[in-house]
Image: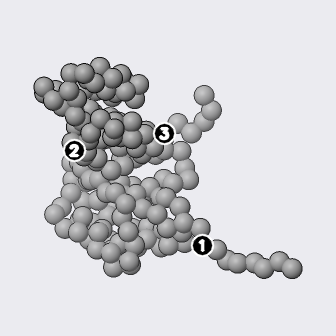
Amino acid sequence: MSTETNAVVESNHIITIKVSNSFNALSRIAGLFSGRGFNIDSISIGDSEIPELASCTITTHGDTRIVEQITRQLDKLVDVEEVNDLTSVPHVSRELALIKVSAPAEVRSEIMQIANIFRSNIVDISPVTLTIELTGNRNKIDACISMLRPFGLKEVSRTGMIAMLREYQGEV
């Protein structure tokens, strides 16, 4: 005997938005999410190639039906020019992290080797700390932080995801 259930499958989603570069735009976007009881995992917004527009990337999680509803609602907002769900299309995405770690002289070279393995940059140094700049996907940044944690994390600052549609969609 088989029982079927209509399980709702949640997944991570990356939504990009071109929005008017005005002080109300971000609050309207955030308000739409909170008004629907939907969580924003990360949000990043900044200038775009068009001076009047800002480029916004939101990462969230939920089932496909709800995310489709959210993208339709975003597209109706007065300040929004364009909305794309990049989740299932080829795209480029990155996150930036600054990681300040305890680095006394006796372990400094080991920390620098870890930073090198992750292709990161040392952007600040003091007698007792190193600050590492790391760019990549969430898994890469999480892995690097995990490797540095035993040395003593002093501070971690992450941007959240930024993303754009991959232009070339063919085979290489």
Which residue occupies 56% across, 53% down?
A: 88
Question: Residue drawn 43% across and 39% down?
Answer: 143
Look at label 2 and name its amino acid. Glu
Categorize mark 1 by other alpha carbons within 10 Å: few (<14), some (14-19), many (20+).
few
Q: Quadrant of residue 71?
A: bottom left
Indicate the position of residue 94 as horizontal and vertical percent values: 39, 42
Furthest-front residue in this view: 106
N-terminal of the pair, mark 2 or mark 3, is 2
The residue that disc 2 covers is 155
Q: Which residue is mark 3?
A: 167
Residue at image position (60%, 73%) is 8
Q: Nearer the viewer, residue 117 or 94?
A: 117
Residue 130 visible in image:
no
Q: Secondary structure at mark 2?
A: strand
Instruction: Using the rendered view, name the quadrant where residue 37 is placed.
Output: bottom left
| Mark pair 2, 3: CA separation | 36 Å
Q: CA distance from mark 1 to mark 3?
A: 32 Å
| The N terminus, quarter of image | bottom right
Q: As shown in the figure, which amino acid type bears the numbered disc 1?
A: Val
Badge nearest the viewer, 1 or 3 = 1
Colour pattern of the rendering:
one colour
- In the image, is 74 to the left or to the right of 27? right
- The location of residue 21, given as percent across then percent down, is 21, 57
Q: CA distance from mark 1 to mark 2?
A: 37 Å
Pointer 1 residue: 8
Q: Residue at x 48, y 41 (%)?
A: 166
Q: Secondary structure at mark 3?
A: loop
Query: Residues at badges 1 and 3 in contact (C-beta under 8 Å)?
Result: no
Which of these two is toward me, 31 or 38?
A: 38
